[in-house]
Image (cartoon, helix red, strand yellow):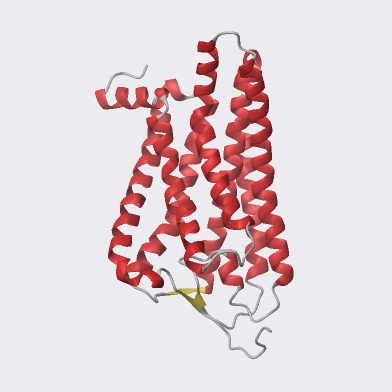
Amino acid sequence: MKRQNHTVVSEFFFQGFSSFHEHKLTLFVVFLTLYVLTLTGNVIIVIIISIDHHLHTPMYFFLSMLSTSETMYTLVIVPQMLSSLIEPGRPISLAGCGTQMFFFITLAINNCFLLTAMGYDRYVAICKPLRYTVIMNKKVCSQLVWGACSIGLLVAIIQVFAVFRLPFCDKEVAHYFCDIRPVMKLSCADTNLHDIINFIVSSLVIVVPMGLVFISYVLIISTILKIASTKGQRKAFATCASHLTVVIVHYGCASIAYLKPESENTRDQDQLISVTYTVFTPLLNPVVYTLRNKDVKDALRRAIRQKPLA
């Protein structure tokens, strides 16, 4: 039964990592290090792609957009996490919580659909190579990016509006940022309908892009297997390996976090999953695309040696 008597709540407090209080210094150092590496890696990718004309292709255009989105994504969440480790119990206003939730949802969904756009780009490059430059022109690439962003914005507006129309009677968020489920648990009202709607929306924004990427790779693998030479097959697989690695980790973490039954894990386990997709996954993007991608590594070498890019 939800409580009916409640006072007006004007701010929230994060429980953060209260279960790991004795390890807060270690956690702070680890998270700060990963945060700096993530920001540095993604910013380097964006700069390298913008200054090196060898990387001015649809594939790297999408990669730069993903890196930009991942950078903003970490800026929305990680500073709050670090602050809660240094100063536990620091409040956040309802407006601040709503703002954080809005940008988190927008950027998370944007990342999902950007990965889908990258999958489509790889499908066209491998399955329709002769028409690649015609199909993946600048207008189409821009439309795919704006489409991903627009879906994120629309879903974020709807979900944030729905959550913050609820009356709240508790102030302590059992999390380290304003995610939808932990905030809804503070409501005095019956949230069963909101929970169902949230699950449906989460399913659509995870399963639909994941399904589209899966279809793309079924067609890609089918085409690659028809290539006569083993060298040609390896080269085709190599162009997809980095993207496929990021896709598996990204959608895997998102599915575990948002599509599992709510009562399946403890709060500590939920936080561990959340740390994976808010701290580790954004770092995966620069790591995979710099260590496994020959074009990006070559561009980095050219930039370091200060060779002319023309």
Whether residue 203 sits left or right of residue 304 in the image: it is right
**Residue 46 visible to the viewer:** no
Assign the C terminus to one quadrant of the image.
top left
The picture places residue 231, in percent across and down from the top left corner, at 50, 11
The picture places residue 167, in percent across and down from the top left corner, at 64, 79
Q: Is residue 206 above or below residue 260?
A: above
Q: Is residue 241 above or below residue 189?
A: above
Residue at image point 65% right, 14% down: 226
Whether residue 210 sits left or right of residue 297 in the image: it is right
Assign the N terminus to one quadrant of the image.
bottom right
Q: Check the image and name the residue furthest to the bottom.
A: 5
Q: Nearer the viewer, residue 286 or 76?
A: 286
Residue at image point 48% right, 31% down: 242
Q: Nearer the viewer, residue 232 or 278?
A: 232
Q: Nearer the viewer, residue 43 or 27?
A: 27
**Residue 296 visible to the viewer:** yes
Residue at image point 43% right, 69% down: 16
Whether residue 195 sits left or right of residue 229 in the image: it is right
Q: How many marks?
A: 0
Residue at image point 36% right, 51% down: 35
Q: Check the image and name the residue furthest to the top.
A: 228
Whether residue 41 sits left or right of residue 123 in the image: it is left
The picture places residue 273, in percent across and down from the top left corner, at 50, 57
